[in-house]
Image (cartoon, rainbow, N blue to C red):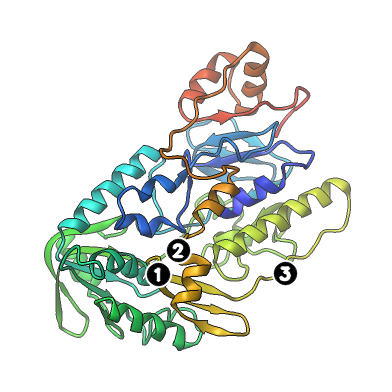
Amino acid sequence: GGVAGGSCARELESAPVSVVLIDRKEYFYNNIAALRAVANPGFERTLCIPYDKLLPAYSAFVQGDVEAIGSDHVRLHGRPDPIRFDYCVVATGTSYAFPAKTPTPRAAEVREMFGETQAALAGAENVVIIGGGPVGVELAGEIAAVYSSSGKGDKHITLVHGGSHLISSRADFPPALGETLRTQLEAMGVTVMVDTRVDLDDLRAQQGAAPSVRYLTGARTLRLADGGTLPTDLVFFCYGAAINSDAYSASLADAVNDHGELLVNSHLQVKGHATIFALGDCAVIEHKLAFLAEEQGKTVATNIRQMIRGEVLVDHHNGLNVMSVPLGPAQGASILPVVGVVGAFITSLVKGSSLFVNKTWRLLKYNAPPPDFALPPPPPLDDRRREQLARVLGCSPGEVEKEISEGFVSREVPADATHI
């Protein structure tokens, strides 16, 4: 799933293949727009997009956790039989603290989580965001755009960053990008602390566990590495993205680097595995940005067609080195080719005003976000369809309805399909 996998599946629509899309979630999570939903109740309805329109005919969506990727099959947790393939595309992405990413498999639970987050934010007085990368900066801006600029509340928002300037993890970007963002945040009422680290060991001791999944509520005092303190009653964690490598770290160990990323060649084939491709955050290729992952999906789909036809594979060419960091709908800064760092107007025009919501829904083949999201009901099953789905899902015909009721939303596969 995600932008990388979704893009590849869409591009394979006209290819002579049956596509099986596997995701642990029943929905596509529009994480590009997710941070706005923290401070804007109702916006969360735009974040969870059904997969039902994305897949081409003769394809299937399977909800599950991949345990291992073999040379010609994948194994899913809780399923005794493997799903076989001729070509495999690995786009497992990264894990990150909520709300930038979400671990829950159900769309309804995502809405509930955002409702709880919005309530926690509304009741908080001292909000601390740890991490001054793109996620932390954007989250601070989204909160400030609602609660500091509009007078809806007297919240003290503090952004704590260990680097010398914001967005410092990107050494290829000039400090001017981070300084422009800092100037705007401070004008919005945000306190920005650079060269400052929170004592995470002390915070873990307070909690009794590592704060890794969501956020922390309740009055507390954060200890800083330099001995200072910071009062807070709401803490967001915006650092530490982890590659989702569990599905391949053992079975494709010869192609995995020390960070858990898959090594790929110029065609995006995994090292030593000609029929397995990798793209997006889990692959060693260009920067981890959604628009680049979308282009990688197109390259992989093209090369699968080329392999089927026995033709020469195409090389993937790295995209432009750009980044856009909105601070709410009207503020922010971007770095663009040739012109360099630009400010609020261009950033709002390019990304901030829309966050690509309509574009992302169109990627999933929806014209626009519906007022309320609900998964479509499974298609009616006749005997022929039940037998075909049983062959794809690896179960008996009598078990197909149960499989679908537990999360499999599938489409018809060719009558002569022997495996996927």
Looking at the image, is 178 positioned above or below residue 272?
Answer: below
Q: Is residue 172 visible?
A: no
The span from disc 3 to disc 1 (Cα, nearest Å) is 33 Å
Neighbourhood count class around disc 3 (C-alpha, 10 Å): few under 14, some 14–19, many 20 upward: few
Q: Give me the residue at 15% from left, 68% from top.
A: 154
Residue 332 image position (x, y, % from top left): 42, 74
Q: Give me the residue at 24% from left, 77% from top.
A: 189
Callout in the foreground (2, 3): 2
Q: Which amino acid, mark 1?
A: Ala
> SS class of the residue under badge 1?
loop
What number is the disc on residue 317?
A: 3
What number is the disc on residue 245?
A: none
- Front position in the image: 107 or 201: 107
Callout in the foreground (3, 1): 1
Q: Which amino acid, mark 3?
A: His
Which circle's residue, 2 or 3, is located before the other in the chain? Answer: 3
The span from disc 2 to disc 3 (Cα, nearest Å) is 29 Å
Neighbourhood count class around disc 1 (C-alpha, 10 Å): few under 14, some 14–19, many 20 upward: some
Which circle's residue, 3 or 1, is located before the other in the chain? Answer: 3
What number is the disc on residue 330?
A: 1
Q: Which residue is mark 2?
A: 353
Looking at the image, is 159 positioned above or below residue 253?
Answer: below
Looking at the image, is 89 positioned above or below residue 393?
Answer: below
Q: Give me the residue at 47% from left, 75% from top.
A: 345
> SS class of the residue under badge 2?
loop
